[in-house]
Amino acid sequence: MAQDDTIKKPGRLKTRPDFLAVQKGKRLRGPYFLLETLDRGKPDQAPRIGYTVTKKQGNSVERNRMRRRLKEAVRHIAGVPFKPGHDYVVVARRDTLAAPFDRLVTALTERIGDNTGGTRPRHSRAEKQSGASDNIKTPGAAGPATRNE
């Protein structure tokens, strides 16, 4: 069997700049995690994957369990072709802990194999600070007045 015929295990994302670069790519939301992907434009390089769990998801024990479950799910989907030259970041959600493992694997398989939809344009930091958003709330526009006269 030739080297090109085998399914390679994806590499790892390790540095903060790599994770930040992937944030600018495509985002696919799922019930248990958010999958961010980025085409590095280098199809001759192996795909890479990283895992993130924010502190608001729980204490360190819970966050590590979520990360381990996601890593194991990726290991189980060896048949799913990760695209060469792409980076993937899996951002865990709290539901990752309680999800049945087979559903977690299925959701991950669908998201990695999904090439359509799920994208959302990202606003630059300057646009967010300047308030260039469609959902701007003005003070006092929260609803009807509740003052009794």
Image: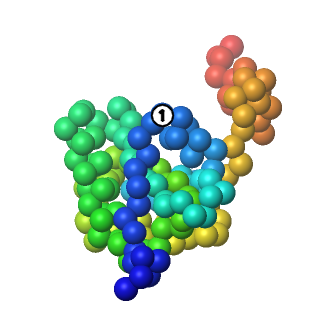
Displayed quadrant of residue 122: top right
Pointer 1: what residue? 16
Is 113 left or right of 70, judged from the image as shown? right
Colour scheme shown? rainbow
Amino acid under disc 1: Arg
134 or 108: which is nearer to us? 108
- Answer yes or no: is residue 68 visible: yes
User: Is 81 above or below relative to 126?
Assistant: below
SS class of the residue under badge 1?
helix
Q: Seen from this angle, which residue lies furthest bottom?
A: 1
Is 126 left or right of 118, judged from the image as shown? right
Q: Position of residue 147 (x, y in %)?
A: 66, 17
Q: Residue at x 27, y 40 (%)?
A: 63
61 or 4: which is nearer to us? 4
Q: Residue at x 35, y 71 (%)?
A: 77
Quadrant location of the N terminus in the rendered image: bottom left
Q: Residue at x 24, y 42 (%)?
A: 64
Quadrant location of the C terminus in the rendered image: top right
Q: Position of residue 139 (x, y in %)?
A: 72, 20
